[in-house]
């Protein structure tokens, strides 16, 4: 069964900052292919670094690998947030994910959020004297 991500108007989904560490493949409706780097991801969408912007409103297929496995979904491209000479940052929102892809994305996000939550704390917490 296909999962159709719904956004809650009153609560923003947690984001994981990837800073371009995850490569993504993007295929537009006309078969145009682009390579991208994921800057940020959430259960509802993300932010891509692309060489050339895609048209706002275009429906695309996006695929990328996580520790939980490959994720493949349909997405809508949103208005680019920043443009540079050699690249642009363009957000997207998922419009359809297969149940297995949704599960893999959720597991990868939960794992990354747990690590980012625990890592800074474990560095800051020190054993009190006397223990």
Image: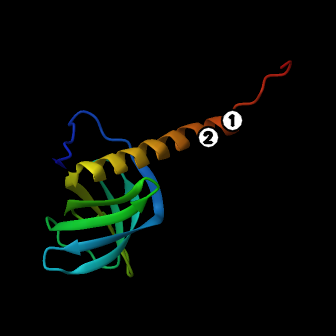
Q: Which residue is mark 1?
A: 124
Tell me which residue sits at (69%, 35%) in the image: 124
Q: Secondary structure at mark 1?
A: helix
Image position, residue 17 (x, y; %): 45, 53
- In screen coordinates, is 30 left or right of 89? left
Residue 87 in view here: yes
Label 1 environment density (alpha carbons within 10 Å; few <14, some 14–19, many ≥20): few
Label 2 environment density (alpha carbons within 10 Å; few <14, some 14–19, many ≥20): few
Q: Camera-side residue: 11 or 115?
A: 115
- In screen coordinates, is 54 left or right of 47? left
Q: Secondary structure at mark 2?
A: helix
Q: Confirm or deny contact between disc 2 and disc 1 (CB under 8 A).
A: yes
Tell me which residue sits at (47%, 55%) in the image: 67
- In screen coordinates, is 106 left or right of 3? right
Which mark is on residue 120? 2
Residue 42 in view here: no
Quadrant hosting residue 115 = top right
Residue farthest along the top direction in this orientation: 130
């Amino acid at each position: 069964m296909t999962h159709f991500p719904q956004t809650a108007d009153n609560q923003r989904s947690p984001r994981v900052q990837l800073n371009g560490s995850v490569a993504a493949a993007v295929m537009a409706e006309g078969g145009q292919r682009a390579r991208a780097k994921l800057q940020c991801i959430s259960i509802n969408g993300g932010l891509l670094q692309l060489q050339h912007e895609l048209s706002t409103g275009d429906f695309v297929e996006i695929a990328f690998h996580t520790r939980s496995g490959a994720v493949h979904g349909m997405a809508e491209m949103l208005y680019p947030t920043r443009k540079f000479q050699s690249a642009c940052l363009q957000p997207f929102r998922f419009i359809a994910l297969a149940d297995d892809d949704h599960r893999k994305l959720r597991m990868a996000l939960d794992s990354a959020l747990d690590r980012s939550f625990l890592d800074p704390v474990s560095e800051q917490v020190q054993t009190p004297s006397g223990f």
